[in-house]
Amino acid sequence: MKVRQLSVFIENKAGRVSEVTGILGDAGINVRGFSVSDTAEFGILRLVVDRPEDASSALRAAGFTVKESDVICVDLPDHPGGLASVLRVVADAGVNVEYVYSLIATYVVLNVGDADLALRLLEGQPVRLVSQDEISSI
């Protein structure tokens, strides 16, 4: 169960994130989660949205470079150490977590070195995996 993430490459200047989110809003697309990382000149806006194909098309039509990738979304156990317990399962198997960011409530996105292995490791754990359909229906 993987979720589609969009990575939008943007110049690191005022108004670029607003422009991207405005394009998505105008297209009727809901942002469910996001993360921004930047360097001096450029940034990467990572997005999980309710309609990833439509979002990608709208952003490309506006001239943005968009990369699509699969990530894992986990509904964390809502107690102290919940995130640590999930990350420990993956780390103990030697799978690198490249980044983590939060979505709605306790939902978090994990981009890992081997998504298929991480999914297999998390099945049967006290954590609920979240599908793209579920994110789309929130």
Image: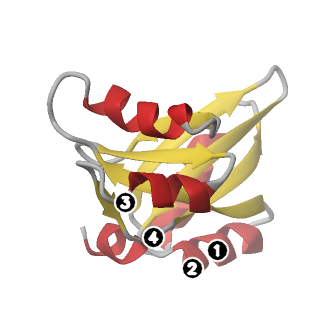
In 3D space, how far apart are the residues under numbered discs 2 and 4 (Cα atoms)? 20 Å
Q: Amino acid at mark 3?
A: Glu
Q: Point out residue 64 in the picture as x, y percentages from the top left corner.
A: 77, 60
Q: Amino acid at mark 1?
A: Ala
Q: Which residue is mark 4?
A: 1
Q: Are marks 4 and 3 in contact (CB under 8 Å)?
A: no
Residue at the (60%, 43%) spot, across then down: 17
Task: Looking at the picture, tell me which residue is in the foreground, 131 or 65.
Answer: 131
Single out the mark in the foreground, 1 or 4: 4
Q: Are marks 1 and 4 in contact (CB under 8 Å)?
A: no
Which numbered circle lies on residue 125? none
Name the outermost residue toward the left: 79
Q: Which residue is mark 3?
A: 123
Q: Which residue is mark 2?
A: 54
Whichever of labels 1 and 4 marks the residue nearer the N terminus, that label is: 4
Q: Amino acid at mark 2?
A: Asp
In 3D space, how far apart are the residues under numbered discs 4 and 3 (Cα atoms)? 10 Å
Single out the mark in the foreground, 1 or 2: 2
Pointer 2: residues within 10 angstroms few (<14), some, or many (20+)? Answer: some
